[in-house]
Amino acid sequence: MPRIPGGRNNGNNNENPPVSERERTRSRTGDDRDRASYDNGRVRYDWDVYTDPRGDHRGRVGIGHRDERNDIYGSVEFNERTERLKGNVEIEREINDNLGVRGAYGRDNAGYDSGRLGGRASGDDGWVDLQLDFNEKTNRLDGRLKSRYKVSDNTTARAEYTARHKKEDSWKIGARTRTGVGDYVDGEAGRSLTLGDYGAGRWVRKDDGELIDDHWVRYSRKKGLEIKSKAHREGENWEADHSLTRSNDVTKHRASARHVGEHATHTVRTNFEHDARDRTSGDITLGRQGDDYDASLRLRKDKSGLKKARVSGSKDVGGGTSLDG
């Protein structure tokens, strides 16, 4: 069977039981949706059709067939309201265990053609993938070359280059190194249409499957500095969390901590924001929940500079009675 990632082949074979699904729903706008799929490992079909309140239909219907080395899938897209009709054919072929090719062609009732042609060569330590895409209606013509290579047992390198007709080319190179079970360090640099030149890095660390560190940072010519960072720590009777984000020149920081004592639980929470106009707002909340009394203190500052403080508490005086203030 074709082994090209991203293709329609889902890897079923005749030894697996057929998969059949059917679902009918209605949206808030009154559209009825009829969706179904069937796959027995060789033959498959599916449809996804909407019927609007006026009775017009739109959607897609497809059918495919696969064997040990070939996969072909055909579909029709239609819209009664706009009178659009488009046919598509997708083909994959596995030439041998290390080489596969794929292609697709589509044509609509306005006479516009579209399609793609690609292939992948793979080995024990990596693969190289080439794909060409075109769309006559949008005047799109792209070529993309991707590769991945296993440098060592813990490190994998990757690269991608995309050439576009009448648009700027883009590229990226990166690598990821495993530093433990579920832990890794990742770095990437490149150029894209949305970011311009950029560089990014990420560090992820887990403890017994639980995330304790996830720190990501990127700097690009078009969007500047971006940060997404969070961490979690805990002990026998305490835990703490922290998060920091920065995007569009707005920085947000949140932190919380909790300690459970013999007679009371103490908490602290902070929430701050600094915007592109150099204004800072936020609050700090200190709390205590105990056997004898509860209390909290909240300090807040808004972007206009106004500062507020609020104190609240309660005490159990016995007999099912409490004093609040």
Image (cartoon, rainbow, N blue to C red):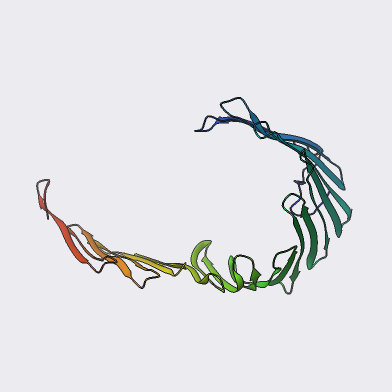
Please name the residue shown 56% across and 30% down the image: 31
Residue in the foreground of this view, choosing between 205 and 85: 85
Residue in the foreground of this view, choosing between 2 and 170: 170
**Could one spot residue 18 in this view of the protein?**
no
**Could one spot residue 304 in this view of the protein?**
yes
Query: Quarter of the image holding residue 52?
Result: top right
Please name the residue shown 70% across and 65% down the image: 167
Picture coordinates of residue 303 (x, y %)? 29, 66
Q: Is residue 217 left or right of residue 236?
A: right
Q: Is residue 210 left or right of residue 71?
A: left
Above or below, 5 against 146 in this view is above
Q: Is residue 40 left or right of residue 168?
A: right
Residue in the foreground of this view, choosing between 38 and 173: 173
What number of labels is visible?
0
> From the image, which quarter does the C terminus lie in?
bottom left
Query: Quarter of the image holding residue 17?
Result: top right
Q: Is residue 3 left or right of residue 267?
A: right
Please name the residue shown 57% across and 74% down the image: 221
Residue in the foreground of this view, choosing between 232 and 89: 89
Query: Quarter of the image holding residue 56?
Result: top right
Picture coordinates of residue 100 (x, y %)? 85, 56
Residue positioned most to the right: 95
Residue positioned most to the top: 55
Please name the residue shown 52% across and 63% down the image: 208
Above or below, 11 against 313 in this view is above
Picture coordinates of residue 174 (x, y %)? 67, 72
Picture coordinates of residue 45 (x, y %)? 75, 34
